[in-house]
Each structure stands twice: as structure tokens, then as C-alpha cells.
Amino acid sequence: MKKLEKFLYWVVGIIIVFAILGAIAPERKARPKKQLTEQQIAEQKLEEKMKKIKSQFSAWDGAHRNLQTLIISNMADPGSYDHIRTTWTQRNGYLIVTTNFRGKNVYGGYVINTIKAKVDFDGNVLKVY
């Protein structure tokens, strides 16, 4: 029985010591958040802008969704639309999107066409060249 009593005294003593240390220990302050540098902020903005631009294009074939819809709606035979390739370049405040596609003309023959369009960063087609 004496061994159990000694053991309990030790356990209670250790608990009391930790309680006292916890009460008198200085409080830890939360670490201040790291301030982003101007370069990091610029990189984040560029990354967000690129995500916004890339979301306008089909992951399947790379076609610009809104330009493709515009092209198909103005074709003689909309069911014959066949996307070949789409490329884009960025200008000040807008994109120039170039799409190559194949489709039937009014005589029923297949032709390859190229359309260039001015598109804003939200994907709206502003002008077709």
C-alpha cells in the first residue's frame, strides 16, 4: 500500500507543478501574418488573371467558348462546324483570339476559315475582324 501512496503523491505533485508553471508562464502571442511583398502581390494578380483567361477556353479542344458559339450561329450549316485550332494573344485590356475552323459553305463544299476577334477578360466577344 505504501508504494501506491508514494506513486499517487508523485503524480499529484507533478500535476501541481505543471499547473503552477502553466499559470505563471508568459502567454504566447500569435505570430503576425507575413506581409506579402509587392512582387508576390503582382504574381498573385497575374495568376488570377491567367486563370480567368484560361477559363474562357475549352479544356477539350482549346476553342474559345463564346467565339465558337458566335461562329456556329452564323454558319450556313452549323452542324458542319469542325474546330481546328485557337490561339490568343494579350493586349492592353483585351485578348485577340484567332480561330481556325472547317465547315460547309452555302454551296455544300467544305472550306477552312480563320476568324479573329477582340475579346475582353470576361470572355465577351467585343469585335470580329
Image (cartoon, rainbow, N blue to C red):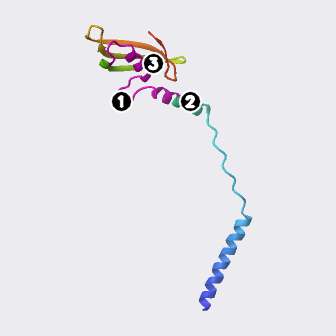
Quarter of the image where the N terminus is located: bottom right
Q: Earlier in the sequence, mark 1 or mark 3?
A: 1
Extent of the magenta region = 49-78
Determine whether the residue tagged by mark 1 lies in a helix, strand or loop.
loop
Distance between the alpha carbons at the discs numbered 1 and 2: 26 Å
**Front: mark 1 or 3:** 1
Residue 58 position in % (x across, y down): 40, 27
Which quadrant is home to the C terminus?
top left
Q: Position of residue 49 (x, y in %)?
A: 52, 27
For marks 3 and 2, give the CA distance: 18 Å
* Residue found at x 42% / y 17%: 70
The residue under the point 67% across, 46% down is 32
Quick one: SS at disc 3?
A: strand
Q: Which mark is residue 50?
A: none
Check residue 54 for magenta coloring: yes
The label number, if any, that marks residue 45 in the structure image: 2
Which circle marks residue 60 in the picture? Answer: 1
Query: Pointer 3: what residue?
Result: 89
Q: Nearer the viewer, mark 1 or mark 2?
A: 1
Q: Is residue 95 a member of the stretch shown in magenta?
A: no
Left-right relation of 71 to 42: left
Compare residues 104 and 122 and report the one nearer the observer: 104
- Identified by mark 1, the residue type is Trp
Q: Earlier in the sequence, mark 3 or mark 2?
A: 2
- State the residue lying farthest toward the right: 24
Decide: few, some or many residues near mark 2? Use Cα within 10 Å; few <14, some 14-19, many ≥20.
Answer: few
Residue drawn 66% across the image and 83% down it? 9
* Point 69% across, 56% down: residue: 28
Q: Quadrant of residue 114?
A: top left
